[in-house]
Image (tube, helix red, strand yellow):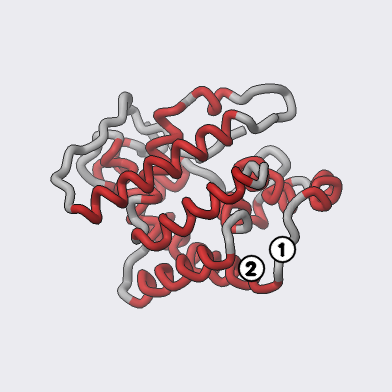
Amino acid sequence: MDDEGGYPNGQSDPKKPQQEQTGEDSEKMETITRIIEMEWEMFQRVNNEGGRADCQDDWETFRVMRESQYECWPLDVLVSLLVGIQRAEEDGRNVVTEKYARMMASTSPEKYKDLEPFLPRLSEEKKELVEEIIRYHRSWMLEHRRKYPNLSARGRVLFSENDTEWNTSAETYLRGELLTWSESTLRLYRKFVQQCWDSGVNLVIEQDRRMVKLYGFRSLEEAEERNRTDH
C-alpha cells in the first residue's frame, strides 16, 4: 500500500513552520489536525493483502501529505469533511478502507465486483460531482507535469488509463477519496475548485508548493532541481 505517493526528496524530519495565527487560522489548523488524526486512526485499521504496509507506520509522511493538501482548502470545506468523517465513524464505517476499495474499480475490477455490494451506494449526483471535480484536477496535473517534470516523475502516474493492479494513478486515488465524501462536502469543494480555476490558481501546484516547504525546500523550483531524474 502507498497511501499518499510522495516523491523522494533528499530531506528528512519535515518541520512545521511557525506562523502567527488569527482566530480563523487557529480554527482551521485545529480542524485539519482533527481530520488527520481521525484519518490516521482509520488508516491503522486498514487490512492489506500481504499484511501491514510500511506506510502505515510512517506518521510523518502521512501528516505532511495530508496537511499540505488541507492547508490549501477553505474552512467550510474542512469542517464539512470533518463532520462527514465523524458521522462515518459513528456509523462504523472506515472511509480510508472505502477509499482503497473504490480505487479497485480501476486497478482490479474483478475484485471490486466482490467488494461493491458492501460499500455505500453511490448516487448519480455524487458520481457527477466527482467527475466534474476530476476534470479540473486532470488539467492541473498536466500543467504540474509540464512545469515540474522531475517532481512529477517521482510521484504517481497521472491518469486512470495507466492504472495496473499494483500501480494506482493520482486520478484514481483522487476519485477513490472523493467518492467517500458526502454530497454536501463535494458541492462545497466543487465551488472552491471552480473559484481556483477562475482565478488561475492551480490547486495541484499549490498543494505541492506547501508540501516541499514542509520538507525544508524554499520553493518548488529548488525542489525540482534537487529531484532531477538524471542525478
Quadrant hosting residue 50: top right
Secondary structure of the residue carrying numbered label 2 = helix
Residue 144 horizontal/vertical position (percent): 40, 57
Instruction: Tell me the quarter of the image containing the C terminus.
Output: top left
Residue 126: mark: 2
- Residue 170 seen in the current view: no
Residue 141 is labelled as none
Q: Taking 67 as reference, is 23 left or right?
A: left
**Residue 174 image position (x, y, % from top left):** 56, 54
173 sits to left or right of 154: right
Indicate the position of residue 70 as horizontal and vertical percent values: 39, 50
104 or 142, which is in the foreground?
104
- Compared with residue 86, is residue 202 higher up or lower down, i.e. above or below? below
Classify 117 as above or below 184: above
Residue at left offset 71%, top offset 45%: 101
Can the viewer see residue 214 in this picture? yes
Residue shown at 36% from the left, 56% from the top: 205
Determine crowd level at label 1: few under 14, some 14-19, many 20+ residues with C-alpha closer than 10 A.
few
- Left or right, 44 with respect to 215, comes to right
Q: Residues within 10 Å of mark 2 (few under 14, many from 20)?
A: many
Q: What residue is rendered at 46% in x and 65% in y?
A: 189
- What is the CA distance from the residue labelled 2 to the residue labelled 1? 6 Å
Which amino acid, mark 2?
Answer: Lys
For label 1, the residue is 122
Dot 2 and dot 1 residues touching (CB under 8 Å): yes
Q: Which amino acid, by three-letter code, is at mark 1?
A: Leu
Provide residue 105's location: percent of width, then percent of height: 74, 52
The residue drawn where x is 58% and y is 52% is: 177
Where residue 19 sits, quadrant-wise, is: top left
